[in-house]
Image: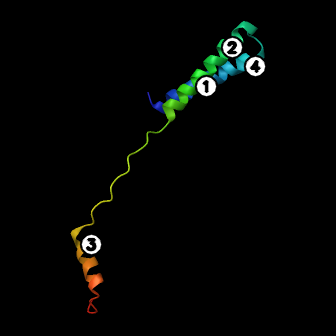
Amino acid sequence: MNAQNLASIFLYIAVIFHLLDMSGWTSTKLAQPIQLAILALMLISIFILRKKKRKKRRARRPAPEVAVMLEQAEEGEPGK
């Protein structure tokens, strides 16, 4: 199962719980546990979807042809 699919499922469940809580169909004793479940589902979705930080890559060494061209340009050869 894809991570985005799993996160979207958790968010849909959280929305359903939120609508159930806001509709008034549940007793007041269940309001806090439902809100905690909503919070937990949303936090799980955030952790699933967050991207890992990538390490900075070192710049690649230029090809040998590029080094030769740079040397020629620095020397200022008028013939080329």
Q: Nearer the viewer, residue 54 or 41?
A: 54
Residue type highlighted by circle 1:
Tyr
Distance CA(mark 1)–CA(mark 2) = 19 Å
Mark 3 is on which residue type? Answer: Val
Please state which of the two labelled residues, at mark 3 or mark 2, is closer to the viewer. 2
Instruction: Please name which of the two marks, 1 or 2, marks the residue nearer to the observer.
Output: 2
Mark nearest the camera among 3 and 4 is 3
What is the x, y in percent for residue 6? Answer: 50, 27
- Residue 46 falls in which quadrant of the image? top right
What residue does disc 4 label? Answer: 22
In this picture, is 2 found above or below 63? above
Task: Name the residue that disc number 3 marks.
Answer: 66
Disc 2 residue type?
Gln
Task: Of the two numbered discs 3 and 2 on the same chain, state the one appearing first in sequence.
Answer: 2
Occupied quadrant, residue 65: bottom left
Labels 3 and 4 touching (C-beta < 8 A): no
| Distance from the alpha carbon under mark 4 to that under mark 2 | 12 Å
Dot 4, how many residues are within 10 Å of its Cα: few (below 14), some (14-19), or many (20+)? few
- SS label for mark 3: helix
**Residue bearing mark 2:** 32
Picture coordinates of residue 20, whole percent (x, y): 71, 16
Mark 4 or mark 1, which has the lower sequence index? 1
3D distance between C-alphas at marks 3 and 1: 54 Å
- Indicate the secondary structure of the residue bearing disc 1: helix
- Please state if 5 lies on the left or on the right of 70 as rendered: right
